[in-house]
Amino acid sequence: MDKGLIIVISAPSGTGKSSICRHLLKVYPEIEFSVSYTSRQPRPGEVNGKDYHFISRDDFKQRIGQDEFVEWVENYGNFYGTSTGAIERVLNDGKDLLLDIEPRGAKAIKNRFPDAVFVFVLPPSLDELLRRLEKRGHESPAAIKNRFAQAESELKEVLWYDYLIFNEELEAAIGQMMAIYKAEKCKISRLRGKIDCFFKSC
Ligand code: 5GP
């Protein structure tokens, strides 16, 4: 059996990344979402075990010590990390995995899983990004300013990603994401097992 595909998606907050991810997961049940661990507090509506595994800072640090994470970062004063075991379990089942993580973590995934696919999502412009951050309404002006500054520095990472989606219109951005996924699934290098089987009639 061919191993599953890892899709990494990164984007500054306020780019519509979550909507794109949600749609991809809905249309393709063979893709699982990688539920990260975080030490940040849940926001209204977020569900433990679905959006994140919400744990304490101490618990997070203990897991770092036990080498549980394939990558982890401290971001906006909180820890975020991806469990190595969870990734391997999904891939060994032949399922695909979607990771919504920031660029430093994405780089670590690229080192460990060079066959993964890296997609960056950008808003139409920096002005639009600021407008969208302000519209989200659940953060203070200081937090928004902080996110905007962080976003500007993350944007510089875009050049080593495989694909870039400008989210000018959500439907179009979702269409591009689905096209990327479908094309990647048809790559010969990902179909070795299936090709072998085809010729051996197994
Ligand atoms: P938020 O707190 O808004 O949910 O996420 C903040 C940032 O952390 C987002 O850019 C998100 O992609 C990133 N993030 C979420 N989980 C992980 C993770 O496991 N590892 C890394 N490196 N970044 C993460």
Image (spheres, rainbow, N blue to C red):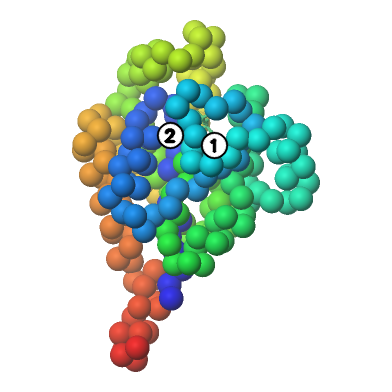
Q: Which residue is mark 2?
A: 11
Q: Is residue 110 left or right of residue 63?
A: left
Q: Nearer the viewer, residue 118 or 58?
A: 58
- Residue type at tag 2: Ala
Q: Considering the numbered disc 1 on the image, is that residue within a helix, a strand or a loop? A: loop
In the rendering, at what x and y percent does residue 87 appear? 55, 56
Q: Which mark is residue 48?
A: 1
**Quadrant position of the N terminus in the picture:** bottom left
Mark 2 lies within 8 Å of ligand 1 (Cβ measured): yes
Q: Is residue 167 left or right of residue 104?
A: left
**Quadrant position of the C terminus in the picture:** bottom left
Q: Earlier in the sequence, mark 1 or mark 2?
A: 2
Disc 1 versus disc 2: distance between alpha carbons?
Answer: 22 Å
Q: Is residue 35 left or right of residue 188?
A: right
Task: Verify CB contact (< 8 Å) between mark 1 and mark 2.
Answer: no
Q: Indicate whether 81 appears above or below 2.
A: above
* Neighbourhood count class around disc 2 (C-alpha, 10 Å): few under 14, some 14–19, many 20 upward: many
**Residue 13 visible in the picture:** yes
Q: Residue furthest toward the top? A: 141
Q: Considering the numbered disc 2 on the image, is that residue within a helix, a strand or a loop? A: loop
- The residue drawn where x is 73% and y is 38% is 59
- The residue drawn where x is 78% and y is 46% is 65
Q: Nearer the viewer, residue 34 or 53?
A: 53
- The residue drawn where x is 48% and y is 19% is 148
Q: Indicate whether 37 appears above or below 94.
A: above
* Neighbourhood count class around disc 1 (C-alpha, 10 Å): few under 14, some 14–19, many 20 upward: few
- The residue drawn where x is 43% and y is 34% is 11
Q: Indicate whether 43 appears above or below 108.
A: above
